[in-house]
Amino acid sequence: MYTVYHNPRCKKSRAGLQYVTELNMEFRVREYLKEPLTEAELTTLVMKLHVKPVELVRTQEEFFKKELKGLNLNDEEWIKVMVENPKLIHRPIVEGKYKAVVGDPPENIDKL
């Protein structure tokens, strides 16, 4: 069973969800803006993605540009920032048991 971390207002997230649907994968959707991630959950996702937390941050968001650009935060601080501001998290993320991918572009999901 896969989990798709999804924001229905995001075109890229909708495209990723559509791709998962077309692959007939067994999955559940978690709208992470309505059901926010905990620090532990996000830390686990980052490990499964094999990225540094800062690599998961959407730098085009207005909040990032005004409040975070140029800051030198450590991994734990980036995790806290994303938990407190979930719009900053790249989407969609598709999580499996041992691995996760950012589904942008949707073909990244094939790596699972």
Image (tube, grey):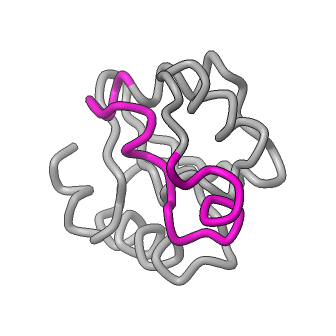
Quadrant of residue 110 within the rendered picture: bottom left
Q: Nearer the viewer, residue 55 or 94?
A: 55
Residue 87: x %, y % from top left? 68, 58
Q: Residue 35 location in percent, x, y?
A: 80, 43
- Residue 82, picture quadrant: top right
Question: Does the magenta segment cover residue 65?
Answer: yes
Q: What residue sits 36% from the left and 53% below the top? A: 102
For the residue pair 73 and 39, the one nearer the viewer reads as: 73
Residue drawn 70% across the image and 49% down it: 86
The correct choice, above or below, for 37 with respect to 23 in the image is: above
Residue at 47% across, 68% down: 17
Is residue 34 shown in magenta? no
Q: Quadrant of the C terminus?
A: top left
Above or below, 32 relative to 48: below
- Front residue of this view, candidates 73 and 111: 73
| Residue stretch rendered in magenta on the structure | 47-70
